[in-house]
Amino acid sequence: MHSHFVLLVLFAFFVSLVFSVMAKDDPREQLRFGGLMFGGFVVSAIVLGWLMFPFPL
Amino acid sequence: MRDTAAEQTQTGGLVLLCLASWALPGVGHLWQGRRQKGLIFLVALPLMFAIGLGLRGRLFPFDLSEPLVGLAAFADLGIGIPYFIANALGFGLGDVRAVTYEYGNAFLIVAGLLNLLVIIDAYDVALGRK
């Protein structure tokens, strides 16, 4: 459990799950909304990570 | 007069609902017959909290002289009974040297904050807004 990426994915999964279940009532909509949110979390983290790559900090 | 008594009963019920929802994540939804949502919250939020403890995150003390520490403590408390169980069993001491320390803190704090949102959601359902 020391992989940063696995922990990021796990965190994104839980947050997306709770938000999608809270925001939508229909299971299909929950799945769609949760999947979009999960994908958004993971992709934006990777993009931000690469954008920060050139900086020394 | 009757309206006032009915309102008081309703207010009492709402307070009880919010307290139950805080104590055990998802119970507010289960109480209102939303089984799918309630069960998911009941499993996901304590599991997220437990993972935070497993990652050697810290249950912050109520040190209000350090505003961020105080706020983190309130966020940790948002998970309800699991917080007290973890405290009683001596978990959540935090290990700053652990690679996963900050991740653990993020899991613990966010689990508590998500439960606060779940309480608000249960309250909205009770009022018929959702």
Image (spheres, rainbow, N blue to C red):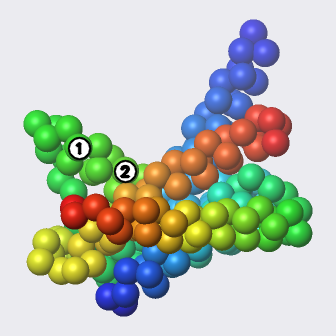
The N terminus of chain B: image quadrant: top right
Q: Residue at x 51, y 78 (%)?
A: A10
Residue A28, visible in the rendered structure = yes
Task: Tell me if residue A7 comes above or below residue A12 in the rendering.
Answer: below
- In the image, B59 versus A2, the foreground residue is A2
The amino acid on which the numbered mark 2 sits, given as a three-letter code, is: Ala
Residue B92, visible in the rendered structure = no
Q: Residue at x 21, y 57 (%)?
A: B60
- In the image, A24 versus B92, the foreground residue is A24
Label 2 or label 1, whichever lies nearer to me, is 1
Q: Quadrant of residue A40?
A: bottom right
The residue identified by callout 1 is: B68
Q: Position of residue A25 (x, y in %)?
A: 84, 58
Q: Residue at x 55, y 63 (%)?
A: A44
Which label is found at residue B75? 2
Task: Tell me if residue B81 comes above or below residue A4 in the rendering.
Answer: above
Give the SS element for disc 2: helix
**Chain at tag 1:** B
Q: What is the distance, in whole Å, between disc 2 and disc 1 at their CAs?
A: 10 Å
Q: Earlier in the sequence, mark 2 or mark 1?
A: 1
Q: Position of residue B34 (x, y in %)?
A: 79, 60
Q: Quadrant of residue B5?
A: top right
Q: Residue at x 23, y 43 (%)?
A: B68
The C terminus of chain B: image quadrant: top right
Q: Position of residue A42 (x, y in %)?
A: 56, 71
- In the image, A45 versus B33, the foreground residue is A45
Q: Farthest residue toward the front? A: A54
The amino acid on which the numbered mark 1 sits, given as a three-letter code, is: Leu
Q: Residues within 10 Å of mark 1 (few under 14, many from 20)?
A: few
Q: Are marks 2 and 1 in contact (CB under 8 Å)?
A: no
Indicate left or right for B49 with B33 as reference.
Answer: left
